Image (cartoon, rainbow, N blue to C red):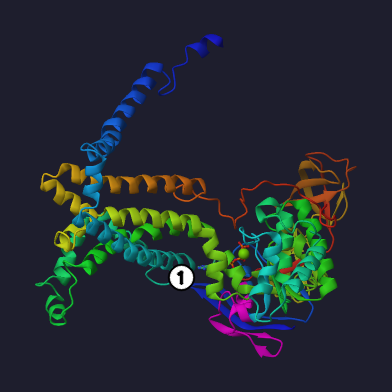
Amino acid sequence: MTTSRTRRPPRIGEKPVFRNTLIAVVLVLVALVIVAPLAIIGVQAFSKGAAFFAKSITDRDTVHAIWMTALTALIAVPINTIFGVAAAWAITKFDFPGRRLLLVVIEIPFSVSPIVAGVAYLFVYGLQGLFGEALQSADMKILFALPGIVLASLFVTAPFVARELIPLMQAQGRDLEEAATSLGASGWRTFFSVTLPNIKWALLYGVILCNSRVMGEFGAVSVVSGNIRGQTNTLPLHIELLYHDYNAVGAFAAASILASLAIVTLIAKVALERRGAGRIRRPALTGPALAGPKLETTEPGISQP
Amino acid sequence: MKIRLDTIVKTFDTFRAVHGVSLEIGSGELVALLGPSGSGKTTILRMVAGLEYPDEGAIFFGEENATDIEVRHRGVGFVFQHYALFPHMTIGENIAFGMKVSKTRRSAAEITERVADLLRLVQLDGLKDRFPAQISGGQRQRVALARALAVDPKVLLLDEPFGALDANVRRDLRRWLRKIHEELGITTLFVTHDQAEALDLADRVVILDKGRIVQTGTPEEVCRAPENAFVMNFLGDANRLKATVTAGRASVNEITFDAAGVPDGPAELFFRPADIIWREDGAGIPAVILRVIDRPDSKRILAVTADGQHVEFDTAPEFPFRTTARGTLEILRPRVFSITPA
Ligand SMILES: Nc1ncnc2c1ncn2[C@@H]1O[C@H](COP(=O)(O)OP(=O)(O)OP(=O)(O)O)[C@@H](O)[C@H]1O
Ligand SMILES: [Mg+2]
């Protein structure tokens, strides 16, 4: 038996050569494709010294771009959070015709290139667009202004929160809500005391992903914002402008803000995943497969210590 | 509180889950809804609770028509099969939840005291600050019951309350539930697909098949006088032999049995495995032993009659006969049901 054991062929990747080569290839790729560009942003941003970095960051147009980005996020993220929670709640807690269709429609922004979304908004709200004339006569500016940017951002990030919540809420089922209502709780009370505490980490996770996408969105926003420097430029658009102006250091300085945001997002994401949000599914706490320490099974009739 | 269901119908999309069920549950009664999987037990229970609305028919709580009253105002206590305890709340908070959201204001001290009383009632004092994930399944189910009782429900509804527990815990819990019911006297309707559980616990058993009530009665009535083949089969092991009925007598292999009230024509004769006397010779249906299965308290004999029908019966452990032994079967307490054309 021992001979057959030593002659046993290695499992996939068990040969040290194979394993080490594979690991090396992956590490090199990660370094080249992911780490190096990020490192270069940092290095380049400070290549003319901290003073120049500070000056670039506090440049009037850059500050305005930061403000535009923050403002967009402040409007778009709460709206999409509410939308995401409402959609997830409707889809998982009620039966209604078109439920499945809604599930598919919510995911559309993920499969459509953002630039397509931008162009579509152009067709709807642009001067030659569907509502163009009506809007102009009402003197409402949607395109090439904040509303357009917010709308495009809303479109692109619509699925983020809903997508995090739906699988979790589906796994949790309706039992908890039904139990709460049968105990006399109103709809709001049920949501805030029962549903929300059980989805809070997933919700925060979705919000953070949504926020980082709103702040970083380029394609859709670039079509609808019109790229007016100091007026309708968001941070990603401004970075591109600076770069085209041959102001590489300025571009990198501005980019370093987005990169820091990415790092903060990443840390928050990892922290939340530890709490069970994201892809790692929590066990359905309402089900029988409750993953908890089974302390003791006592016979009824015997009091607990 | 008396509950009355008046020809309730429920259809899901195109599937009719409940066909015109009428039922009356007396005040303080403990009634079991018993039936195989998919027979509509949960659906009926949920309609009584208000978690589902009937398409037709009405539900009365006492004299009041409760059909359209929302769950939260219906005043029922519902215990879910998988407990549905709020995982982010301690046991104490779970039990207090109903009192906190209720319209009748209670002081914090009152609530604390009531929680303590309920924990004592379900024999879980000391577990107040644990979370549901930190207690066993049987304990969780008792917490779920305490939580439902906390709001002083007019009616207690339990959906397979012990379904997820192992056999020993189940048996203990149902005796315990019976005791609690006797103490509190709340009208209780519970769902189960376990015959022993229904017979052990209930004052009255309602047997369902495919969304219809097939028999209602005390455990004694349904056991001793099953009204049809389904009930006979569903309540326990039953043997079935082909028979022919003529003028109130059913004949099987030239032996005749009383079959008063059964229409002439093809029928089936049913009997329990315990209701057979095996003889080496004598009057009875001739048969051959195929197999002997040993059990802790008896022997189960598998035999085949002369005309090739299989029969199983139980005997004392001392039963001396072995495979291929020939003899005759005397059937005690047979029941004859005519074969209704499908
Ligand atoms: N929400 C629903 N949508 C569609 N069909 C349903 C729904 N709920 C129940 N049904 C169907 O109605 C029938 C009765 O279901 P019900 O849950 O009442 O059965 P049950 O007697 O409780 O069974 P079990 O013992 O398996 O719990 C089943 O065939 C089921 O598939
Ligand atoms: Mg059921």
Left or right of A186, for residue B203: right
In percent of the image, x 63 and y 71: which residue is there?
A: B340
- Magenta span has B47? yes
Residue A94 in the image: state x and y as whole percent. 47, 70
Residue A40 in the image: state x and y as whole percent. 25, 36
Left or right of B325, for residue B81: left
Q: Which span of residues is magenta-colored?
A: B46-73
Q: Is B3 placed above or below A252 here?
A: below
Say which of B31 and A65 sits in front.
Answer: A65
Report if residue B223 is visible in the image.
no
- Residue, disc 1: A95
In percent of the image, x 73 and y 51: which residue is there?
A: B166
Q: Chain of mark 1?
A: A
Locate ligand 1 by image quadrant. Answer: bottom right
In percent of the image, x 27 and y 63: which residue is there?
A: A155
Type of the residue with mark 1: Asp
Q: Does the beta carbon at disc 1 come under 8 Å from ligand 1?
A: yes
Say which of A68 and A298 sits in front.
Answer: A68
Query: Which residue is farthest front?
Result: A51
